[in-house]
Image: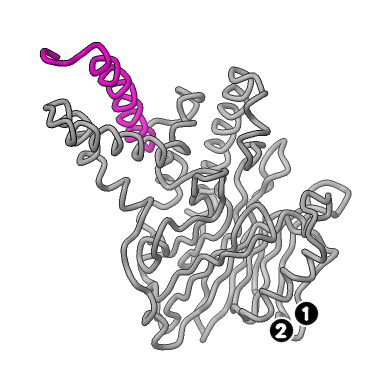
Amino acid sequence: MKGLSFFGKAIFFFNSIFAILLVLGYALPYIPPHIFPKLSVLSLLLPVLLLVNAVFLIYWVLRGKRQLFLSAFVLITGIGHISSLYHFGDNSNATNGEGLKILSYNVRSFNLNGWSKQKNIGERIIEFVTKKDPDIVCFQEYNPEHTLTTQQYPYRYRKMIGNSNLFGQIIYSKFPIVHTGSLDFDDTGNNAIFADVVIDNDTIRIYNVHFQSLRVSSKFNTLKDEDSKRLLGRMGEAFKKQEEQVMVFLKSEQKSPYPVIVAGDFNNSSTSYMYRKIRGVKQDAYEKAGTGTGRSFTFDFIPLRIDFILADPKFEILQFENYDIKLSDHYPIESVINKSFKF
């Protein structure tokens, strides 16, 4: 660090810390959360770490200092992670041909608990989905106070949590459902359900998943006064629980006699261990046909992609879209998948 002022050395010191954190973030998809639970938080912070390292790189480039190679190296090393967080492309012509349209949306109980001051949120969500008219709809945090019509969706499977019958998940389908099931995660309000759907004489399995919630507000101001150690501990425990739930899901998926499509709220990012395990060889609809950040949840200014549609390699992804409607703490996602398949 010869030739650097005291200020320059201090900048490089912090640069090194953020570079190390970024490298650790790269490794997380391969480290089971139960080994280092609190470290798993970095999987959600990876967009910030990438941005900070990019700022350091620009700083050193403008200064003409060789310290630029540190951030340049870690950014180039993680080019695959960057492509999973931001996709360049244009899907405007991707809807040519007929496809199976699947929509997934965490509806936050249609504002049953009054988290938003907006009026008629439940009715507006139902109106939005009705207008979009997808073939398959997966709602997480579903409440039966608002429902899609049986005329539009004659087939459905829902699973409520506990005895209140006010919170659960539902799969709506325009096509016949011949078998259903619930994974019934232990000691939680989260769950995963599935429905075997017959389309053009072929059967596919649709999973609607809602993995362990982190119980973190989308507003930084509500977190800054919380004890950081307690917050990290709570999130670490949630990541461990997610790992357990993923193992339950994988056992169910392995038994499926049909090609699988997984939709829902993972409560974790595409750079996490759980995402890597669930995805396996499946296609990520966003990576195939999406654009931009793929944001499905916003933590203040940080766009997070924690809701996914993953499909068996036998399918062809035609389109993916994020809808920018603020009727929940999540945003709805939708994919059009080629249904002219033969198995």
Between 172 and 145, the residue placed more toward the observer is 145
Q: Residue at x 47, y 45 (%)?
A: 269
Q: Quadrant of the C terminus?
A: bottom left
Q: Is residue 33 above or below residue 97?
A: above
**Residue 290's x, y, as percent?**
40, 66
Is 295 in front, or is 7? 7
Place of residue 184 in the rendered image (x, y in percent of width and height, measured from the top left): 69, 47
Residue 339 sits in quarter = bottom left
Mark sitting on residue 312: none
265 vs 223: above or below: below
Residue, disc 1: 149
Dot 2, how many residues are within 10 Å of its Cα: few (below 14), some (14-19), or many (20+)? some
Q: Residue 125: where, in percent of width, then height?
A: 72, 68
Question: Mark 2 belongs to which amino acid?
Answer: Gln
Residue name at image x 59 percent, y 29 percent:
235
Q: Look at the image and give the residue range highlighted in magenta.
A: 1-29
State the residue position of label 2: 152
Q: Main secondary structure of the magenta part?
A: helix
Residue type, label 1: Thr
Left or right: residue 18 versus residue 149 is: left
Q: Is residue 333 left or right of residue 10?
A: right
Specify whether 42 is left or right of 23. right
Q: Where is residue 319 shown, x and y percent of the image?
A: 42, 74
**Is residue 224 or residue 110 the one in the foreground?**
224
SS at circle 1: loop
Quadrant including the N terminus: top left
Callouts 1 and 2 close, C-beta under 8 Å: yes
